[in-house]
């Protein structure tokens, strides 16, 4: 009998997960490593992030895997080009999980140029640079996976997240374009959109709004970073080779009501 889990295995593949030092990025990185992938763990370079990323690398190595940490502040010019160069010098990238992003909640009437530009730089400009550098080489090798981490904000934007929600909607649009351009060359591009996931970023918000939000989720609870791992593994492996250009919500059914 053939092994039903063989298509999920990623032995010999290299994955770059941006923003992988904690929460959703960390969970996905550990899941891909557990399936056999070599992991490039990206972080933004602060003292705290260096420590967190090193801890993820050590955890992967302790389970018999291979990983290395890479620092790059996505708000800086050419950050995506620099990160792509550093990681590909270590190993050619087969899987790109674009998880790193920032959100600066505020009333749209008070959004400043500084806050607008920072969110665009981190969430879109650096994303584009990574795609420019890594997707063509995936296509040249005949195999690649791009998974962008979107948000329920794409379709249900919070009033205080005008810019963030807009960048996530744009990211989904890019996935559709890449899926059409590179699907015939063995590269798939999909968007994985979490719902209300309890993370450090939104813990304060969830303390105030969590009960109200949970009432609107058929699953009856907030999500956790680990809830994203199964979907990510599907989209990053041969098990999902015929899934391309998809926006997959992992939200406990929130968008269904």
Image (cartoon, rainbow, N blue to C red):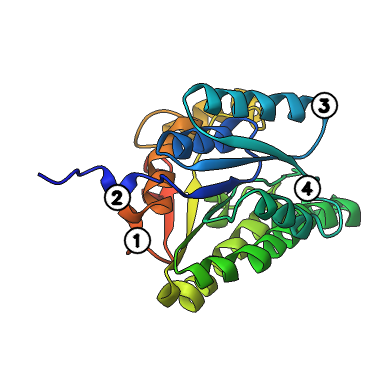
On residue 107, the disc is 4
- Which mark identifies residue 70? none
Report if the CB atoms under discs 1 and 2 are less than 8 Å apart: yes
Q: Earlier in the sequence, mark 1 or mark 4?
A: 4
Quickly name the residue at label 3: 47
Left/right placement of residue 133 relative to residue 64 reads: right
Q: Residue at x 78, y 47 (%)?
A: 107
Q: Residue at x 48, y 51 (%)?
A: 192
Residue 119 in sight: yes
Q: Position of residue 51 (x, y in %)?
A: 73, 24
Q: Nearer the viewer, mark 3 or mark 4?
A: 3
Residue under numbered circle 2? 7
Q: Which residue is mark 1?
A: 241
The crowding category of the residue bearing disc 2, from other C-alpha atoms within 10 Å (few below 14, some 14 to 19, many at least 20), is few
Q: Are marks 3 and 4 in contact (CB under 8 Å)?
A: no
State which quadrant residue 124 falls in: bottom right
């Amino acid at each position: 009998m053939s092994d039903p889990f063989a298509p999920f295995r990623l032995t010999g593949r290299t994955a770059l997960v941006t923003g992988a030092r904690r929460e959703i990025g960390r969970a996905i990185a550990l899941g891909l490593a557990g399936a056999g992938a070599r992991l490039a763990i990206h972080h933004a370079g602060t003292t705290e992030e260096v420590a967190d990323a090193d801890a993820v690398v050590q955890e992967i190595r302790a389970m018999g895997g291979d990983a290395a940490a890479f620092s790059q502040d996505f708000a800086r010019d050419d950050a995506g080009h620099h990160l792509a160069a550093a990681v590909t010098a270590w190993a050619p990238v087969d899987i790109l999980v674009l998880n790193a992003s920032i959100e600066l909640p505020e009333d749209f009437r008070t959004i400043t140029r500084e806050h607008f530009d920072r969110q665009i730089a981190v969430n879109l400009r650096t994303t584009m640079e990574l795609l420019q550098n890594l997707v063509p080489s995936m296509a040249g090798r005949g195999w690649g996976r791009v998974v962008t981490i979107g948000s329920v904000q794409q379709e249900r934007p919070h009033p205080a997240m005008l810019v963030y929600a807009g960048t996530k909607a744009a990211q989904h649009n890019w996935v559709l374009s890449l899926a059409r351009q590179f699907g015939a060359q063995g590269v798939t591009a999909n968007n994985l959109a979490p719902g209300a996931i309890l993370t450090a970023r939104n813990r304060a918000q969830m303390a105030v709004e969590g009960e109200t939000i949970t009432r609107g989720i058929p699953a009856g609870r907030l999500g956790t970073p680990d809830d994203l791992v199964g979907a990510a593994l599907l989209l990053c492996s041969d098990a999902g080779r015929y899934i391309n250009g998809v926006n997959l919500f992992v939200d406990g059914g929130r968008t269904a009501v």
